[in-house]
Amino acid sequence: MASIKKVAVTGGSGQIAYSLLFRIANGDLFGKEQQIDLRICDLPEMTDALEGLAMELADCAFPLLHKVTIGHNLSEMFDDIELALLVGAKPRTKGMERGDLLQENGKIFVGTGRALNEAARKDAKIIVVGNPCNTNCLITMHHAPKLLRKNFHAMTRLDQNRAAALLATKANVPVESVRKLSIWGNHSATQVPDYTQVEIGTKRAVDLIQDQHWLQQEFISQVQGRGAEIIAKRGKSSAASAASSLIDATRALYETTREGDWYSSAVCTDDNPYGIEEDLIFSFPLRTDKKGNYEIVKGLEWDFFIKERIAVTQRELLEEKSHIAHLLKG
Ligand code: NDP
């Protein structure tokens, strides 16, 4: 059996974590042979909730759950971890502007980055889910200079999964036959779900679906608006699908990507092959090799429609960065 994996999850008493932690403990993340040392973090006032959660995890008698630690001191909780799933963040409240949310949550990620810098393994992988996740990830990365910049991610996998499911339904095929779907840019309403490279079975999606209006208008806006649509129906956010996509997003970083496909994750733009400004966290199509290293898929061409939208999402990320520039220092 492989050595025990030390994994930290923040926002441990939140909705996403409630779906996520049981899947991790069940072996859905690293397989049925891999023991896990799970560190569940949240604010001091959430201690009772974390204690209850730890009781439930114990009651499941998961054979792979070697150890569970709950706590709020991130420097202690991140000791020697190789993976951090940063879910904890304040939700946007009524009347709150995106700029306010950036400031509020940005501060949280300064502390998180410093704690990672102090305690985590240098090659730890970090995935940020708490919104606005791209910019929160940028802040975290800046405050954890000892860690590899390449290993910081913000999750766009839920957007990818939503887009794949929509295309599969439209083409009336199983979802696993949808390949080469890219999400470019920010995990926000400006994200660009790129159908132009998608292959469905042996055909290109644009040839199979043959409905340019649906692809350019309805498909993109449905992916962008899916979260709000679910809140309107359920009265609660899409926490279970976010958790499930986080499992997919993490596995994609460890497992060799299947032939003829790629996945999307927002990563640091340093040296990117698409001319996106450096020092941003931007979603690209990636492939993971046999050694567990990823590369941005090179050489994809953007038509005018996609290119225009990518410019918009890049601009939004630059604006977000300028809003929190003071949080990137020191
Ligand atoms: P959730 O667990 O539902 O969501 C956590 C974060 O994930 C939010 O930022 C949310 O963004 C984001 N998110 C990304 N994708 C999705 C999606 N598809 N559906 C829902 N959320 C998504 O939030 P809770 O309020 O239930 O829990 C948050 C936890 O974080 C609490 O336990 C709280 O105590 C903790 N927390 C920790 C802080 C700290 O300092 N460490 C500070 C504040 C909170 P969005 O709001 O845009 O939905």
Image: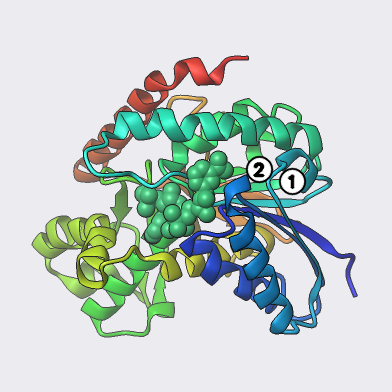
Q: Residue furthest left?
A: 213
The residue carrying pointer 1 sits among few (fewer than 14), some (14 to 19) or many (20 or more) residues within 10 Å by Cα, namely some
Labels 1 and 2: the sequence-earlier one: 1
Residue at horizontal 48%, vertical 15%? Answer: 326
Identify the amino acid type marked 2: Asn
Q: Are marks 1 and 2 in contact (CB under 8 Å)?
A: yes
Above or below residue 251? Residue 129 is above
Q: Residue at x 63, y 31 (%)?
A: 111
Residue that numbered label 1 is attached to: 124
* Residue depicted at 63% across the width and 14% down the height: 330
Q: Is residue 76 found left or right of 148 in the rendered image?
A: right
Query: In the rendered structure, which amino acid carries the disc numbered 1?
Result: Ala
Left/right placement of residue 283 relative to residue 119 reads left
Q: Is residue 131 left or right of residue 68?
A: left
Residue 273 seen in the current view? no
Q: Residues within 10 Å of mark 2 (few under 14, many from 20)?
A: some
Q: Residue 329: which quarter of the image?
A: top right
Which residue occupies the foreground of this view, 155 or 258?
155
Instruction: Give the x, y percent position of residue 279.
Output: 52, 25
Residue 168 in percent (x, y) is at 30, 77
The chosen color scheme is: rainbow
Residue 48, image quadrant: bottom right
For label 2, being within 8 Å of ligand 1 is answered no
Q: Position of residue 257 (x, y in %)?
A: 60, 65
Q: Which residue is mark 2?
A: 151
Relative to 180, does residue 109 appear above or below in the rendering?
Answer: above
Q: Nearer the viewer, mark 1 or mark 2?
A: 1
For this view, does 86 lie left or right of residue 300? right
Depth check: give the residue in front, 326 or 175: 326
The residue positioned 50% from the left and 70% from the top of the image is 244
